């Protein structure tokens, strides 16, 4: 058997003098707990910003910025098609080909843009009462889970036309509008078309 210790270099490691001085203090259990508590408290104070607030300079005037700003108004986004919108409960993703926009039951629904109603479907399952609109150039939109329908197949519609009302028909757990948009039959993220 080979003794590896004889092949290792014999060097003596000396400690830092400050380390030798503080070692008895930090090896004591009560000292460790006290020092750890101090570090935790000071980190929390710094994280909350108590210390940095004292060093901030007051802003005397608005400073110009060169960053591009995007402003969304009431005339952009889902608010146009659903003025009484309260939020978005489910976004577009691979297993959900649409956007679920929440609103109170009976809220008016408008199309994303002008077009012609090409299909109306009424079912106890899936989309419940739904309307499909052809906007031309291969773009179609589907509005599902509607309560009342105010248009018929073949009707021309504009952005101001009320298609119907938010309901709870089909497979749904609460009042909302399920909006799908397709371009040449391929599902698209509705938010890209609403902005």
Image (cartoon, rainbow, N blue to C red):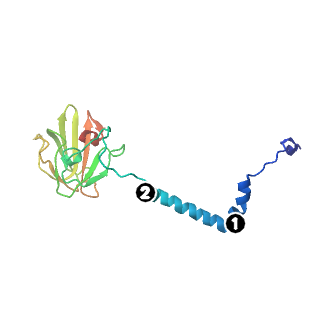
Residue 183, position as x, y percentages in the image: 26, 34
Question: Would residue 120 be found to the left or right of residue 183 on screen?
Answer: left
Please tell me which residue is depicted at 14% across the width and 42% down the height of the picture. 159
User: Which quadrant holds the C terminus?
Assistant: top left
Q: Which residue is mark 1?
A: 28
Residue 72 is labelled as: none
Say whether disc 1 or disc 2 marks the residue closer to the N-terminus. Answer: 1
Residue 120, position as x, y percentages in the image: 17, 45
Q: Is residue 130 visible?
A: no
The residue lying furthest to the top in this view is 137
Instruction: State how far apart marks 1 and 2 are (Cα).
Output: 36 Å
Q: Which residue is mark 2?
A: 54
Q: How many marks?
A: 2
Please tell me which residue is depicted at 27% across the width and 41% down the height of the picture. 70
Question: Would residue 1 be found to the left or right of residue 26 on screen?
Answer: right
Residue 71, position as x, y percentages in the image: 25, 43
Within 10 Å of disc 2 (Cα), the crowding (few <14, some 14-19, many 20+) is few
């Amino acid at each position: 058997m080979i003794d590896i210790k004889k092949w290792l270099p014999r060097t003596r490691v000396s400690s830092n003098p400050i380390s030798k001085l503080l070692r008895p203090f930090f090896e004591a259990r009560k000292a460790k707990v006290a020092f750890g508590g101090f570090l935790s408290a000071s980190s929390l104070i710094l994280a909350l910003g108590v210390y940095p607030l004292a060093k901030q300079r007051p802003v005397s005037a608005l400073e110009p910025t060169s960053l591009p700003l995007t402003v969304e108004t009431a005339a952009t986004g889902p608010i146009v098609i659903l003025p009484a919108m309260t939020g978005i409960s489910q976004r577009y993703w691979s297993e959900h080909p649409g956007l679920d926009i929440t609103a109170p039951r009976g809220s008016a629904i408008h199309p994303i843009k002008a077009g012609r109603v090409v299909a109306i479907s009424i079912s106890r399952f899936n989309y419940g009462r739904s309307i499909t609109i052809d906007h031309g150039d291969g773009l179609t939109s589907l509005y599902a889970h509607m309560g009342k329908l105010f248009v018929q197949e073949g009707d021309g519609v504009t952005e101001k036309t009320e298609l119907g009302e938010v309901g709870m028909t089909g497979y749904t757990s609460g009042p909302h509008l399920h909006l799908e948009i397709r371009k040449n039959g391929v599902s698209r993220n509705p938010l890209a078309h609403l902005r």
